[in-house]
Amino acid sequence: LPPVLKLGKEARCRCGAVVDDSTPITTMDCIVYDHCGATRTSLEVRRCPRCPSKSRMSAGPDLGELGLFNYNNSTIISHALLNKYDAMVSASETTFHAFCLIMAREYEMYGSPLEFMGEDRFRTCWFSFLQLQTCGDAFTCTVCGDAPRVVIVDGVTVGFQKRKQTSTLRPPTHACATSACHSNVRVPKK
């Protein structure tokens, strides 16, 4: 990772406001959670002009081009970690609690300088990330057509809001020249 995660052209606050270039840039600390450990770093932000000043809301970088999901400018999660949960939940019905326990143990095994986040925070981050994904399929409802407002899959209701989409949003499996490459991943013994 770069020492400071730079603010891109499209700085967007959680309220949905796009912040213009005239607003001064400040730097704040954040934690990047990956599939093999967490690390502290910094990122550039701009104050949001739409949010009340006492809320201290800031527009931060998208970070999708680095394979990262910026949850709230202080919690950054790699797409690899989110994909790991997707793979586990689709193969073995892994609960959030079980996944967080597994990750806490893996962080300890890999010697991560920081602990894995709590179950509530991971759940919130995962559903926030899920809201940004484009889920295409061949399913069609006989009543609603091919774009129903609500889709229930295995008892979980998932909603996707268009206002959360950005122009640089890519699927979590998208890889580019700047994507993270982990050489210290241990292959399980067979």
Image (spheres, rainbow, N blue to C red):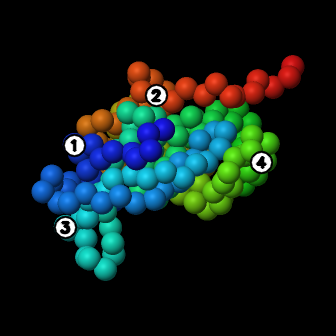
Q: Mark 1 and mark 3 in contact (Cβ < 8 Å)?
A: no
In 3D space, how far apart are the residues under numbered discs 1 and 4 (Cα atoms)? 37 Å
Q: Secondary structure at mark 3?
A: loop
Residue 110 seen: yes
Residue topped by disc 1: 9
The tag earlier along the polypeptide, 2 or 3, is 3
Instruction: Find residue 179 and name its label.
Output: 2
Residue drawn where x is 32% and y is 67% of the image: 57
Residue 96 seen: no
Label 3 environment density (alpha carbons within 10 Å; few <14, some 14–19, many ≥20): some
Residue topped by disc 3: 49
In 3D space, how far apart are the residues under numbered discs 2 and 4 (Cα atoms)? 25 Å
Q: Secondary structure at mark 2?
A: loop
Q: Identity of the amino acid at label 3?
A: Pro
Q: Identity of the amino acid at label 2?
A: Ser
Label 2 environment density (alpha carbons within 10 Å; few <14, some 14–19, many ≥20): some
Q: Nearer the viewer, residue 57 or 109?
A: 109
Residue drawn where x is 56% and y is 34% of the image: 80
Residue topped by disc 4: 108
In 3D space, how far apart are the residues under numbered discs 1 and 2 (Cα atoms)? 19 Å
The tag earlier along the polypeptide, 1 or 4, is 1
Judged left or right of residue 145, residue 100 is right
Across and down, in percent, residue 134 comes to: 39, 35
As drawn, which residue projects farthest toward the left?
Answer: 22
The tag earlier along the polypeptide, 1 or 2, is 1
Label 1 environment density (alpha carbons within 10 Å; few <14, some 14–19, many ≥20): few
